[in-house]
């Protein structure tokens, strides 16, 4: 993260942060990078980040970070405009990369959902599906996780600015878990664990806390969900439980979607 | 006679968590209309929780808010425990309190320094502030990091931690793990006291309102996870009676429901309410610093909430220190839950105020119905009421400054619109005639 020694005013790369349907947690990760925040804001220009600043500069931006899924007509149009203003578009978190927990509506009747939550349904405008950003516009990099890992975010932004490939592993949580020296919760204790099909990045946090992984980093590259389903059945899990396990924060990723639908016999 | 019509439009209100808009219409000297519009897209948590297993609820509800996930986990587990009739271990209770202190420190440090202080010092953001006051921002970041670290020790990560569950925790820390927090917490306590003294020097607008303050009250402690719901106007109820006294209204311009007290109207939850109702229970250090900086209940000026938040930082650090000294690990990390068909409610004190959850569960522990009332939707009507009064003071002000002041008045509440459904588009419509 070097900055030019001469001329603080030298043109810094402009970064923008956009929010769609989400919990704010992934953009908060940027402010949660307490050790890196001051160097980062020294090296880049935060041009648009409403959660942190009243200053809102117009595009184009060098990097756009997008949090959240697309759930309304207005947002479906807004993401097109965001894409036009960003040289590099990076989606951050399970909502932006897989539709998020709110994609559970995709298997239900959204009009009924509106009636459950709101007294006057006609005031509410929403799409039938909650979808990842890449279903709407080309995306340059998808950073997984619910929430994302702030170190991966800093690595990704640094790599993008330098123009190298980011070091974001695509292997499974199992690899991270072994490296930490955890005893396997599935093998030793028979707990249902999505680790074998989930992308690394969280630091195998659930197995480290004596529970099975719940898949919040989404499917790893070449996830063998069929094999895991067989294993979960052998552990005594009912298909309805397996369907629910895949129907979490990355439910609408095609791998988890397919796996959950194969176990959903309703 | 002045017939100019001026309109200010700020497209995005910043430094709040979420997306919304504000319209204020001034006709002559009169504030004709105030609308806090929240167009954060709805996410339907209460709908898709139905049919999920009780054990999944704390992990799912955490995703309502990345700033206060612990609050959502706490209200969820307490509500379900009440439904199943579970009594938790005293050590688990203590750990949950520590977990909450971590979130208060993280959330309050974020709001005091990074979201709210720039208004008082005249900066657009913490970035500009860091340019002139680097040591202040470094202090803020270290403070916030310590709050986050508590959550990470207890829950594996600061955003959406993974350890809280019905009956206790998946895994509880050792005494040594908590003792390691002591050095940082001693520093944080001093830093919080400095923070409180620093905020006391700000210029506060002369503005007071006659609020109904609503907060949890516990017989023996500054309430976080349990207590009765009380107000300064005689409300004193069990949390299960919440829905008899409070009602949510759906207004056309907002995707967050407005909450009111039946028969009375708007009310205020959060740091100001807690401070005013439970001042006697603050840790002695927090109380002493409050009095030293001239804060004593009732504080009725919402702009002073930044100082009250700083006092709660002092409290949270002192309380965390007490807990890590007293803590002995529980015999089991959690009590085994036995599901039964029942309804359970809980209220806990999220950083922004009381957070109500209710679940109806079946005999297998599946959720039949869920209801969640976040603090921001409870404060939303009160924010509008403040603006209606406050905007009247600003009629003669240049529009740009008036707009900034209105934004600041909204930020008094640290609104989390992601919770209440989220950026504000601020428009002041000024019609002169």
Image: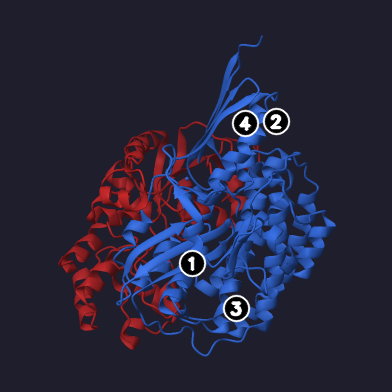
Chain colours: A red, B blue
Q: Is residue A160 above or below residue B366?
A: above
Residue assigned mark 4? B403
Q: The disc numbered 2 marks a residue on which chain?
A: B
Q: Few, some or many C-alpha atoms within 10 Å of disc 1 (few <14, some 14-19, many ≥20)?
A: some
Q: Which residue is drawn at 23% across and 83% down?
A: A236
Do we see residue A168 in this rendering? no
N-term mark: 3 or 4: 3
Label 1 sits on residue: B240
Q: Would you say the residues marked 1 and 3 are in contact, meaning their CB atoms lie under 8 Å apart?
A: no
N-term mark: 1 or 3: 3
Q: How crowded is mark 4: few (under 14 residues within 10 Å), some or many (20 or more)?
A: many
What is the quadrant of residue B102 in the picture? bottom right
Q: Please name the residue that numbered disc 3 is placed on.
A: B94
The subunit letter for the residue under badge 3 reads B
Q: Mark 2 points at which residue?
A: B393
Q: Where is residue B195 in the image (x, y as percent from the top left)?
A: 75, 56
């Amino acid at each position: 993260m070097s900055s030019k020694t001469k001329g603080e005013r030298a043109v810094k790369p402009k970064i923008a942060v956009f929010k769609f349907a989400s919990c704010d947690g992934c953009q908060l990760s940027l402010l949660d990078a307490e050790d890196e925040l001051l160097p980062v804001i020294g090296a880049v220009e935060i041009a648009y980040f409403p959660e942190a600043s009243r200053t809102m500069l117009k595009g184009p931006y060098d990097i756009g970070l997008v949090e959240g899924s697309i759930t309304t007509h207005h947002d479906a149009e807004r993401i097109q405009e965001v894409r036009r203003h960003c040289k590099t578009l990076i989606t951050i978190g399970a909502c932006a990369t897989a539709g998020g927990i709110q994609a559970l509506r995709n298997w239900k009747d959204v009009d009924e959902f509106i009636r459950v939550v709101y007294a006057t349904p006609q005031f509410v405008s929403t799409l039938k599906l909650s979808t990842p950003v890449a279903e709407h516009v080309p995306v340059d990099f998808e950073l997984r996780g619910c929430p994302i890992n702030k170190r991966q975010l800093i690595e990704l932004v640094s790599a993008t600015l330098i123009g190298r490939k980011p070091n974001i592993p695509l292997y499974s949580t199992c690899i991270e878990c072994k490296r930490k020296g955890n005893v396997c919760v599935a093998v030793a204790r028979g707990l249902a664990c999505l680790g074998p099909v989930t992308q690394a990045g969280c630091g195998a946090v659930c197995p480290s806390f004596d529970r099975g992984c719940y898949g919040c980093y989404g499917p790893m590259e070449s996830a063998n969900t069929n094999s895991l389903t067989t294993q979960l059945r052998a552990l005594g899990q009912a298909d309805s439980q397996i369907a629910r396990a895949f129907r979490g924060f990355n439910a609408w990723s095609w791998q988890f979607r397919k796996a959950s639908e194969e176990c959903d016999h309703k | 006679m002045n017939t100019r019509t001026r309109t200010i439009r700020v497209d995005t209100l910043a430094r709040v968590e979420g997306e919304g808009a504000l319209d204020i219409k001034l006709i002559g000297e009169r504030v004709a209309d105030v609308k806090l519009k929240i167009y954060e897209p709805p996410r339907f948590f209460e709908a898709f929780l139905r049919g999920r297993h009780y054990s999944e609820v704390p992990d799912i509800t955490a995703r309502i808010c990345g700033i206060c996930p612990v609050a959502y986990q706490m209200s969820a587990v307490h509500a379900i425990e009440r439904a199943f009739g579970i009594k938790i271990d005293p050590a688990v209770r203590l750990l949950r309190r520590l977990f909450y202190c971590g979130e208060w420190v993280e959330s309050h440090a974020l709001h005091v320094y990074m979201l709210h202080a720039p208004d008082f010092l005249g900066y657009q953001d913490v970035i500009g502030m860091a340019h002139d006051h680097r040591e202040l921002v470094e202090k803020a970041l270290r403070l916030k990091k310590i709050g986050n670290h508590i959550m990470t020790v207890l829950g594996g990560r600061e955003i959406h931690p993974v350890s809280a569950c019905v009956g206790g925790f998946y895994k509880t820390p050792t005494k040594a793990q908590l003792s390691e927090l002591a050095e940082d917490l001693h520093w944080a306590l001093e830093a919080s006291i400095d923070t409180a003294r620093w905020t006391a020097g700000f210029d506060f607008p002369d503005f007071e309102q006659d609020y109904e303050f609503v907060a949890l009250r516990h017989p023996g402690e500054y309430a976080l996870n349990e207590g009765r719901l009380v107000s300064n106007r005689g409300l004193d109820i069990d949390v299960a009676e919440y829905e008899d006294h409070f009602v949510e209204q759906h207004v056309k311009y907002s995707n967050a429901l407005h909450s009111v007290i039946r028969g009375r109207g708007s009310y205020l939850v959060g740091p100001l309410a807690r401070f005013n109702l439970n001042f006697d229970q603050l840790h002695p250090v927090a109380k002493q610093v409050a009095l030293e900086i001239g804060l004593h209940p009732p504080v009725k000026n919402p702009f002073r909430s930044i100082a009250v938040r700083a006092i709660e930082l002092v409290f949270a650090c002192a309380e965390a220190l007490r807990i890590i000294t007293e803590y002995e690990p529980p015999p089991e990390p959690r009590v085994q839950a036995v599901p039964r068909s029942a309804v359970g409610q809980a209220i806990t004190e999220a950083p922004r105020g009381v957070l109500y959850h209710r679940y109806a569960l079946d005999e297998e522990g599946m959720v039949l119905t869920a209801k969640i009332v976040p603090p921001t939707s409870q404060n939303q009507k009160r924010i509008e009421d403040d603006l209606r009064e406050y905007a009247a003071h600003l009629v003669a002000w240049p529009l740009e400054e008036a707009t900034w002041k209105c934004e600041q008045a909204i930020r008094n509440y640290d609104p989390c619109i992601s919770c209440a459904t989220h950026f504000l588009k601020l428009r002041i419509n000024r019609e002169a005639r």
